[in-house]
Amino acid sequence: MDEFEVSLRRRVGEAREAVRLAAERQDDYAVEVHGADLANLRRLAAEHGVVVDAPEEEG
């Protein structure tokens, strides 16, 4: 696993956690912002063939 993949997986994990915490705080704006960041990271991962989500998380 190269440095790009490791970094991308770490950033996806951080974005997921940020979404979870924002949802916990009922901060809709932060959920949107962090959710958009997560979507962009997932798109970037897909473009480079990096799997960042377990199959049960998709959908």
Image (cartoon, rainbow, N blue to C red):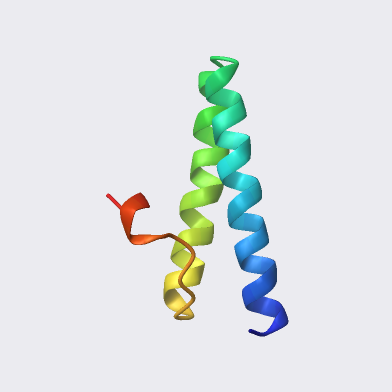
Q: Residue 4, position in %: x, y?
A: 67, 78
* Foreground of the two, 35 or 14: 14
Residue 30 position (above or below residue 54): above
Most distant residue in the bottom direction: 2
Q: Is 59 on the left or on the right of 16, as rendered?
A: left
Q: Residue 33, position in %: x, y?
A: 56, 36
Residue that appears at 66% across and 48% down: 14
Q: Is 31 on the left or on the right of 54, as rendered?
A: right
Q: Quadrant of the N terminus?
A: bottom right
* Foreground of the two, 37 or 13: 13
* Foreground of the two, 17 or 36: 17
Most distant residue in the left direction: 59
Residue that appears at 51% across and 20% down: 28
* Foreground of the two, 15 or 28: 15
Q: Is 56 on the left or on the right of 10, as rendered?
A: left
Residue that appears at 52% across and 50% down: 38
Q: Residue 22, position in %: x, y?
A: 59, 25
The picture quadrant where one finds residue 11 is bottom right
The picture quadrant where one finds residue 55 is bottom left
> How many tags in the picture?
0
